Image (cartoon, rainbow, N blue to C red):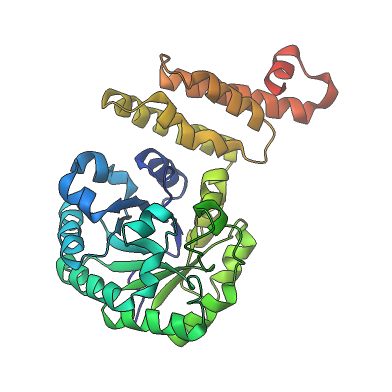
């Protein structure tokens, strides 16, 4: 059995991060990765503004909608909307540990109710037609974190027809830890996910959690079908570009030239998005990491911050920010004899 998803690299659904602007930037940098929306509840899909909640740029494809919920009928209806709008995948969230999500009876707390999850998957699978239905989950919750607990949960969702499984290699504490702490305090246990992949050899499994270097990603891909990258994609977008190039067998090209081309396309997109009501702040936020760990990063961030209030042409603002960052980087290369303009950019 071949995995339902051909892409071996994906960007995790992240609240207040993976909006349509960030996803478009990711697609420009990494053409071959799979992208995910922020989690949207089934109730919101059925009663909210579909264009605002689910709208996307066609260039974002392949794009997955992540749904939250525990009512099979509502999830099936939301899945039909997703299919009608052209999403390439529908993903059920069984991994978010926030108290708001838990109180709504969806997210990671569903790991304690595998039969409910199985009912949801069956309903979504019937509504999805040929579109893959996948699950994102944890390796356990609270005191339900034994190998047997995980095997039982995964066995039920596989029997129900899930096409692909994404596993965050940490357990979640539903009480006592914040969502941020649940991403850092419970120890990473990658070996549990690798063991799970060996136990379900016909199931495509992606691992998520703690992947911040190309070496770690390539090592994981020898054990599982896919790797999902979360915060590192926001902090260091070029990591995705480098990984995608490697997996596709493409030469990376000269970074400064490529960065200018990406920003030119993004600026065109941003100009149209502003006309549709997007804010300058929302459009510039995803760009902050473009010089991560590089000379010129401070000048780049400062220039973006000055443009945040809006009012300037976004094309001019990005061009100016890029020129300042590159000047600052060149000043570092030249050493002590930098000119005053470059010194100001570095300060």
Question: Count of labels shown?
Answer: 0
* Quadrant into which the N terminus falls: bottom left
Looking at the image, residue 95 sits to the left or right of residue 341; the answer is left
**Residue 261 higher or lower than 96, as above or below:** above
| Residue at figure coordinates x 53%, y 50% from the top left | 231
* Quadrant into which the C terminus falls: top right
Q: Nearer the viewer, residue 335 or 77?
A: 77
| Residue at figure coordinates x 60%, y 27% from the top left | 300
**Residue 162 higher or lower than 92, as above or below:** below
Looking at the image, residue 245 sits to the left or right of residue 122; the answer is right
Rendered image quadrant of residue 108? bottom left
Could one spot residue 261 in this view of the protein? Answer: no
Q: Nearer the viewer, residue 70 or 195?
A: 70
Percent coordinates x, y for residue 116 in the rendering:
27, 74
Residue at the far right in the pictured view: 336
Could one spot residue 69 in this view of the protein? Answer: yes
| Residue at figure coordinates x 16%, y 50% from the top left | 46
Rendered image quadrant of residue 306? top right
Q: Nearer the viewer, residue 46 or 267?
A: 46
**Residue 21 higher or lower than 177, as above or below:** above
Looking at the image, residue 30 sits to the left or right of residue 42; the answer is right
Q: Nearer the viewer, residue 296 or 117?
A: 117
| Residue at figure coordinates x 52%, y 38% from the top left | 258
Percent coordinates x, y for residue 330 in the rendering:
71, 27
Percent coordinates x, y for residue 339 in the rendering:
76, 15
Percent coordinates x, y for residue 3 in the rendering:
36, 75
């Amino acid at each position: 059995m071949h995995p339902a998803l051909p892409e071996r690299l994906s960007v995790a659904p992240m609240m207040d991060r993976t909006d349509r602007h960030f996803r478009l930037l990711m697609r420009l940098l990494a053409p071959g990765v799979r992208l995910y929306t922020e989690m949207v509840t089934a109730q919101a899909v059925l009663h909210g503004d579909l264009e605002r909640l689910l709208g996307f740029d066609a260039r974002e494809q392949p794009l997955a909608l992540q749904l939250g919920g525990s009512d099979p009928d509502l999830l099936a209806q939301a899945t039909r909307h997703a299919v009608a709008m052209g999403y390439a995948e529908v993903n059920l969230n069984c991994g978010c540990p926030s108290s708001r999500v838990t109180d709504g009876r969806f997210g990671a707390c569903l790991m304690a109710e595998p039969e409910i999850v199985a009912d949801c998957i069956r309903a979504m699978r019937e509504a999805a037609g040929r579109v893959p239905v996948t699950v994102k989950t944890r390796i356990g919750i609270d005191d339900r974190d034994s190998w047997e607990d995980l095997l039982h949960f995964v066995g039920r969702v596989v029997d129900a027809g899930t096409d692909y499984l994404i596993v965050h290699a940490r357990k979640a504490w539903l009480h006592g830890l914040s969502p941020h702490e649940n991403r850092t305090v419970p120890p990473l246990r990658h070996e549990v996910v690798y063991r799970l992949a060996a136990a379900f050899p016909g199931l495509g499994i992606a691992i998520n959690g703690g992947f911040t270097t190309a070496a770690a990603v390539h090592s994981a891909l020898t054990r599982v079908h896919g790797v999902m990258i979360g915060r590192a994609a926001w902090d260091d977008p070029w990591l995705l570009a480098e990984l995608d190039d490697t997996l596709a067998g493409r030469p990376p090209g000269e970074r400064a030239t490529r960065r200018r081309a990406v920003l030119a396309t993004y600026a065109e997109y941003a100009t149209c998005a502003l006309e549709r009501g997007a804010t300058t702040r929302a459009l510039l936020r995803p760009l902050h990491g473009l010089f991560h760990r590089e000379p010129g990063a401070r000048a780049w961030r400062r220039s973006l911050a000055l443009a945040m209030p809006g009012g300037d042409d976004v094309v001019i603002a990005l061009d100016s920010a890029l020129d300042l960052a590159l000047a600052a980087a060149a000043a570092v290369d030249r050493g002590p004899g930098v000119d005053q303009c470059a010194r100001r950019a570095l300060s």
